[in-house]
Image (tube, coloured by chain):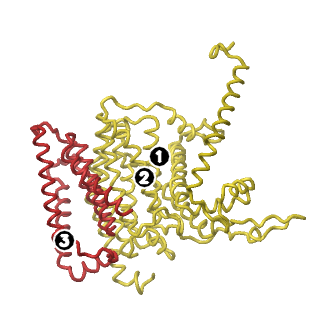
Chain colours: A red, B yellow
Amino acid sequence: MADAVFLALTVITIGSAIAALELRSLIYGSIALMGTLGGIAGFFFMLDAPFVALFQLAVYVGSIAVLILFTVMLVKRELIFKKIEDKRRKFAGIGLMMVVMVGLGAVFLDSGIKTISTDEPAVDFRDIGTDFVTYYWPALILMGLILAGSVTGALVLAKREDVENDQRTN
Amino acid sequence: MSAIAPKFKLSEFIKSLLDNAFWTVLLASLIGLPAIQVVLFYIEMPVINGELLTPFLALTWLADPTRSLPILKAFMATDMFRVMVFPGFGFAALIAAGTIFIERKMLAKLQLRVGPFYCGKIEGILQLMGDGLKLISKEIIIPAKADKPIFWAAPVIFVATAAAFVALIPVAPGWVVADVDLGLLAVFAVIGFFPIVTILSAWSANSKFPFIGGIRALFQMVSFEIPLILSLLGVVILTGTLNLSEIAASQTNFPWIVFLPVGAIVFFITMLAELERIPFDLPEAESEIVAGWLTEFSGMMYGLVQLGTYLKLYAFAGLFVVLFLGGWNGPMVVPPFPEELLTGVQVGPLTVGPFPGLPLFDQEMLNGTLWFVLKTVGVIFFILLPRGVFPRIRIDMLLSLGWTKLIGLAFVNIFIALGLLYAGVLGPGGLQ
């Protein structure tokens, strides 16, 4: 059962990744990208990490993919891209990707990942939280500062100064 | 002679009926019954009251309604029942349908109109059924240059996403379709799918007004998702869990709205924006852009989108009840199940019962459902009310509200929660 799900997820993830690169329609490409990101979320579910999986769905599929869709829809494709398309380039691209993936896979397999035991109990997300506030607290504070900075920046950007008074909201 | 069927003959008509009956009986006995037998051979039948449910036993039980109660009870214990009927789709769709009718009638009363009136004897009570029949029988028109696969899929995905949202809402103790340990995160993940469906359907219609509406919907939903998530973190901080059932169960003494009114208000406003309801109905602004992103939908596709919208409304109201109003908690008002029915009632010379399989629902579940539905209906009323009261606001006001005021208030709410926790008012050693 798990093997079948793993295989299906693999096919979905890699297939939609190839589709995201190769489809001529940018919208369908972004939908395929969503499929890839969703497939990765599925892998996290299989790895007993539902916390990461749900964040993957909420952030990557829910926000990043929407951002990409939005950008793609507002852009006239012909203005940016010049189409240089022939069969050889296409297959060379797919081949290059395959070579890179096989190389990375070989590195991973060689790195001793085979000896990891897989029947460990799943890590509770509360333990991750405890680790964050005890051992990894500098990293947490750094992240907090960066996020606070970006939120403040977004608020400042949203409060435009060049709007005339009669267009103001209140 | 009738003009519609000029060559009508009664004998021919009866002959055709008999013909159909003959072939039905023949095919059913030659193909239908053996097929059922073959299928039954492979299905694992449940054991009810210590007896294996053979087709013969099932038929005898069906003939005697009191004896079919165990079958009903066994069916109610299955996941299928949860998904299709009670805390799942059927229940939510019933509430959604009721909401549509109540909304039209209530708005009419608010604006001194009569609203739906003619369909059905009393106050247009059958209007909803009439609308449904109309939507089903209407032709589905697809714009000539629309992107057909996405355009077809969008309403279905919309309803599916709304149903996934409904599945996460606990209605009574133990009565929830998907009791996820990270329920609130799952809610955030599901909410994230709505803007995608909206913008894809808007783009695929290849028409100006849907596209403008879709872009507006995207702006609105994405920018209000942030205060929505932040406003719920206070509850998570106080309860220490993301499981919605546990959050509801933690409010036996008092609902969280007592301590986190700011969070509840922020969540309610963001809820209105996510649901595209007045005063935030810019995506469907019917006086500006026809019907916004719904413009090109017709027939049952529009019906599906409408169903999804109201399922989403129910789910958001249910989420508000679970997080802030105490979920199913409330005084016990449902009377206990009469004991006589379990042992048998003496009616004159006859003894009626005992009925095996009763009670179908326990007292706690009925009471929980009653309180949950009452609170949810109240929240839905307050979601519908602004539609009769407020005008639509401008998009820059909307974005400014979301990005500056609501996010700030959500942080205030988080600090209130942290203060309550560290001051020892709530949490370990405190009130709860």
Q: Does residue B73 sit above or below B427 in this rendering? A: above
Residue type, numbered disc 3 = Met
Q: Earlier in the sequence, mark 2 or mark 1?
A: 2
> Dots 3 and 2: beta carbons under 8 Å?
no
Q: Secondary structure at mark 3?
A: helix
Q: Does residue A53 sit above or below B97 in this rendering? A: below
Q: Which mark is residue B307?
A: 1
Q: CA distance from mark 2 to mark 1?
A: 9 Å
Query: For residue B213, which quarter of the picture?
Result: top left
The reply, left or right, for residue B268 in relation to residue B113 is left
Q: Mark 1 Cα within 10 Å, few/some/many (few <14, many 20+)?
A: many
- Where residue B227 sits in the image (x, y, percent)? 31, 61
Query: For residue B323, which quarter of the picture?
Result: bottom left
The reply, left or right, for residue B347 in relation to residue A1 is right
Q: Residue at x 47, y 75 (%)?
A: B250
Q: Residue at x 65, y 41 (%)?
A: B122
Determine which residue is flagged by label 2: B162
> Dots 2 and 1: beta carbons under 8 Å?
yes
Q: Mark 1 belongs to which subunit? A: B
Query: Between residues B289 and B236, which one lies in front from this camera angle?
Result: B236
Q: Which mark is residue A143?
A: 3
Q: CA distance from mark 3 to mark 2?
A: 33 Å
Query: Between residues B366 and B376, which one lies in front from this camera angle?
Result: B366
Query: Between residues A140 and B144, which one lies in front from this camera angle?
Result: B144
